[in-house]
Amino acid sequence: MIYGGCVTDLCMLDAVAIAGMLRRREVSAREVVAAHIARIEAYDPVINAVVTRTFDAALVRAADADDAMAMGRPLGLLHGLPVAHKDLADTAGVRTTYGSPLFAGNVPQRDALVVQRMRQAGAISLGKTNVPEFGAGSHTVNAVFGATRNPYDHDRSAGGSSGGAAAALAARLIALADGSDLGGSLRNPASFCNVVGLRPSPGRVPGWPFRDVADMFSVSGPMARTVADTALLLAVLAGPDSRVPLALDEPAPAISEPAQIHALLDRDLTGIRIAWTPDLGLPVEADVLEVLAPARQVLAGLGGEVIDAVPDLSGADEVFRTFRALGFAACRADLLASHPDRVGTNVTWNIQQGLELTTADLSRATVLRADLAGRITAFFADADVLACPVSQVAPFDVTLDWVHEINGRPLRTYLDWMASCYLISAPGLPAISVPAGFTAAGLPVGLQLVGRRRGDWDLLPVARAFESATGYADRGPDAAPSLTGPTGGQKGR
């Protein structure tokens, strides 16, 4: 069956809608997968989001999915949905480069847990999405595949490190994507590409295999075009795993049909208390502030109270940078020692920062982290949700290495412009980026909603209500001038 007279129309539908059509047999998995493959072949040569492709295997799995439907077998929540996996996540038998020339030919023997769970839920992988080298930074470019370009303006960055995933979703190349987030890698690219990215609470989505059993900063999570789709993927990815000591014991919500995700999200928000800050005390571009300003009134219309309040994040910067550096040194120092000429500048800097850490540095960061946790707990005693910017800047020139200044204020390191995200990572809070509007130049801007510790499933209904009240998530790059031309042609609006 060809949906709507044109098979590519399927790509315009969200994941929950496609899942419903598959279950009602209004369309086959073969048609869904073929439509998305055709769109990747048409548009991705410019965007460069899906960098390793598994189309032949996907078509075989689509045929198997249709056979399972015909025989009345039980269907997973993601049955027949086309997805792609971040190139930091191991995929058995499929090239996984981590964005590094050292691993350009690497083919893992096992799947990462997020990949395994998506496959078991019936998702059909079309390939791997682009990342910066080892996920370092929120700008997706590497020496293996080059840069991923923003579907709304091909001269701009798609963000990172899940930039390939965000761009693929925005361009309607896939229905769902997994990603990971250390200092904003799910949230920043979601903001840049007008999609939804959720950083779950540490342990909500167990990471396996892992390098650091005690790591609570880097998390895996879902990305999609809508909050409902994001929640659907979270329901698949979340849940305990006995091999992961820090995995949360709480199971994912028990739903048997994708459409049931709406019942989890459509809550009465009467009485909700939302703390609003336009900048978290950080420098933010005027264009971003202008786009986000109306969001305060939208939040006030959700049925609760909005107050101006900023959490005390003292020490969060040092906590994040210390443990980030430690992680890079522990996991990548051997590569720098053996191949110093083949490790990029950002990764080299992170490793060197980690190698210079002392016991006193780690002890101080540990104490600061405990103090931060106490202040955050006190802050959320008086607020249910914090609303603030995702990114301090709008999508920037794709040829830049990183943002060197904001509002004329020079930035010291390539991390500085990501502070609005990584300061939220430090206390381990769940946070989501939701489309919040566009600059005058047509560049997407997201709103960051932050929940209480382990309050993922309470945060999602707030995000869904904001999304429904604004409608910005419906505005794809195809609604504006085009995805054509070597530099994107006219800019999307």
Image (cartoon, grey):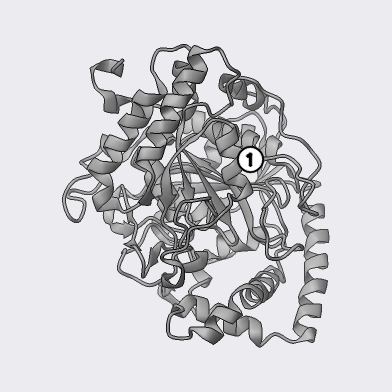
Number of numbered discs visible in the structure rendering: 1
**x, y percent for residue 378:** 82, 53
Q: Is residue 265 left or right of residue 169?
A: right
* Relative depth, front residue between 63 and 181: 63
**x, y percent for residue 330:** 66, 75
Q: Is residue 472 left or right of residue 269?
A: left
**x, y percent for residue 253:** 71, 29
Look at 54% across and 54% down and name the residue there: 89
At label 1, the amino acid type is Leu
Look at 71% across and 71% down and name the residue there: 319
**x, y percent for residue 348:** 51, 81
Residue picked out by circle 1: 237
Q: Is residue 347 above or below residue 48?
A: below
Taking the image as drawn, is residue 383 in sight? yes
Mark 1 Cα shell of 10 Å, populated few (<14), some (14-19), many (≥20)? many
* Relative depth, front residue between 303 and 456: 456
* Relative depth, front residue between 305 and 489: 489
Look at 48% across and 47% down and name the residue there: 85
Taking the image as drawn, is residue 290 in sight? no
